[in-house]
Image (cartoon, rainbow, N blue to C red):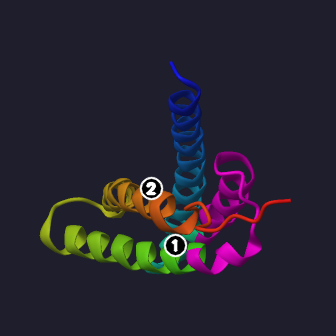
């Protein structure tokens, strides 16, 4: 395997690990709050914020190795977009299926993760066009 292919495969693997951790953190917070009687939209927001904070730190430092705090606004904008998508999917599932809140949240989280991967890779953490050279 050439160096470039290995490097990209390793990055995709790290992204997957971070994504799994983000998703786990977000879903655990969501489920705990849902269990406590909090409305699913608020539970999703709280879980998403927890996952977002973990995700930005790990993605910027470990996955993409691009520690640029100025990219936080992109990450946050993507988070808001993904939150809206997640809540929209949950609402559709809760209104038009027999899924309960836990399953609707799990399905919505899985679908939103696919969208988030693409946007993080292609926009939030895309390499600078004119990298600074020392």
The residue lying toward the viewer, choosing from 37 and 68, is 68
- The residue to which callout 2 is attached is 117
The answer to whether 64 appears left or right of 123 in the picture is right
**Residue 125 location in percent, x, y?**
58, 62
User: At numbered mark 1, what does the secondary structure look like: helix, strand or loop?
Assistant: helix
Q: Quadrant of the C terminus?
A: bottom right
Task: Name the residue at 33% across, 61% down.
Answer: 108
**Residue 119 location in percent, x, y?**
44, 64
In magenta, the rendered stretch is 49-74
The residue lying toward the viewer, choosing from 61 and 52, is 61
Q: Is residue 61 above or below residue 79?
A: above
Asked if disc 2 and disc 1 are in contact, CB closer than 8 Å, the reply is no
Residue 22 occupies which quadrant of the picture? bottom right
Q: Residues within 10 Å of mark 1 (few under 14, many from 20)?
A: many
Task: Name the residue at 65% across, 51% down.
Answer: 64
Numbered-mark total: 2
**Residue 29 location in percent, x, y?**
59, 61
Task: Name the residue at 52% across, 81% down.
Answer: 77
**Residue 67 location in percent, x, y?**
76, 61
- The residue to which callout 1 is attached is 43
Hey, which residue is sitting farthest right in the picture? 134
User: At numbered mark 2, what does the secondary structure look like: helix, strand or loop?
Assistant: helix
How far apart marks 2 and 1 lie (CA) works out to 22 Å
Dominant secondary structure, magenta: helix
Q: Residues within 10 Å of mark 2 (few under 14, many from 20)?
A: some
The residue lying toward the viewer, choosing from 64 and 133, is 133
Q: Earlier in the sequence, mark 2 or mark 1?
A: 1
Residue 26 covered by magenta stretch:
no
The answer to whether 44 appears left or right of 118 in the picture is right
The answer to whether 97 appears left or right of 131 in the picture is left
Using the rendered image of the protein, determine whether residue 48 is visible from the camera's viewpoint: yes
Q: Is residue 18 above or below residue 76?
A: above
């Amino acid at each position: 395997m050439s160096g470039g292919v290995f490097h990209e495969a390793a990055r995709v693997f790290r992204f997957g690990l971070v994504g799994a951790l983000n998703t786990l953190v977000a879903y655990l917070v969501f489920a705990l709050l849902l269990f406590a009687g909090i409305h699913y939209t608020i539970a999703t927001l709280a879980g998403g914020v927890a996952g977002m904070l973990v995700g930005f730190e790990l993605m910027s430092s470990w996955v993409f190795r691009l520690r640029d705090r100025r990219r936080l606004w992109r990450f946050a904008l993507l988070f808001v977009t993904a939150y809206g998508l997640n809540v929209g999917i949950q609402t559709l599932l809760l209104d038009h299926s027999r899924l309960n809140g836990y399953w609707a949240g799990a399905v919505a989280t899985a679908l939103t993760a696919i969208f988030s991967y693409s946007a993080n890779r292609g926009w939030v953490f895309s390499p600078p066009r004119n990298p600074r050279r020392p």
